[in-house]
């Protein structure tokens, strides 16, 4: 099974649609974009994480939540999220790198699938990777590194306070 097959079968959650597979998300986003093709949209991918104690084992576990947001400027949007777990993250640096890498990995597979679905009939949208780092706090020393990871991968990076995909939406579900 390749990455594309894996991602199509991943299950996300949505307040609007309940549990959905990635392939269904593509259809939902396509329909949302086609409602007003002349509007400006943002497609946002962001990941946040939180350390939790696993109830049955008592061991620390990192909950990584990736949010996928499609936003029609001035008119609201839709979002989807998925959760995965990690146990080998011990420092803030590792956590931020894992969050950023998770978003980039998802974008690298999802965006081509969405583009293929739109079949060249693309409403204008800005693709942004939101990173949960900012000028204030412990993560400020990592901004250049993780922004470099994102821009080096060909995406636009947004950091706090503009990184709502990671710092607000994904955070809400960690």
Image: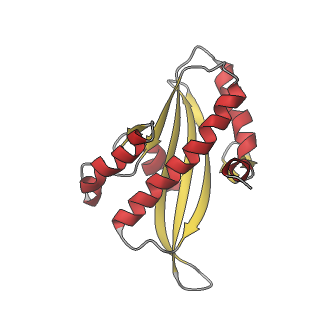
Q: Residue at x 74, y 56 (%)?
A: 1
Residue 43, image x and y in percent? 54, 34
**3 displayed left or right of 164:** right
* Along the viewing direction, whichever of 149 and 118 lies nearer the viewer: 149
Q: Residue at the top extreme?
A: 38
Q: Residue at x 67, y 28 (%)?
A: 32
* Along the viewing direction, whichever of 41 and 2 lies nearer the viewer: 2
**96 displayed left or right of 87:** left
Q: Quadrant of residue 24?
A: top right
Q: Residue at x 66, y 46 (%)?
A: 15
**163 displayed left or right of 16:** left
Does residue 173 appear in the picture of this structure? no
Residue 69, image x and y in percent? 56, 39
**55 displayed left or right of 31:** left
* Along the viewing direction, whichever of 137 and 118 lies nearer the viewer: 118
From this view, report whether residue 158 is shown above or below residue 12: above
Q: Residue at x 24, y 52 (%)?
A: 136
Does residue 11 appear in the picture of this structure? yes
């Amino acid at each position: 099974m390749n990455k594309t097959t894996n991602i199509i079968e991943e299950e996300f959650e949505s307040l609007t649609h309940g549990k959905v597979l990635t392939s269904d998300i593509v259809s939902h986003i396509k329909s949302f974009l086609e409602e007003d093709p002349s509007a400006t949209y943002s497609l946002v991918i962001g990941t946040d994480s939180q350390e939790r104690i696993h109830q049955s084992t008592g061991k620390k576990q990192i909950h990584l939540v990736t949010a996928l947001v499609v936003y029609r400027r001035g008119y609201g949007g839709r979002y989807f999220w998925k959760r995965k777990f990690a146990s080998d993250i011990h420092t803030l640096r590792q956590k931020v790198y894992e969050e950023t890498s998770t978003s980039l990995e998802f974008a690298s597979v999802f965006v081509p699938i969405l583009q293929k679905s739109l079949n060249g009939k693309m409403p204008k949208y800005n693709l942004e990777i939101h990173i949960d780092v900012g000028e204030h706090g412990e993560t400020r020393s990592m901004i250049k590194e993780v922004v470099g990871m994102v821009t080096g991968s060909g995406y636009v990076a947004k950091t706090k306070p503009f990184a709502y995909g990671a710092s607000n939406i994904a955070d809400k579900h960690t």
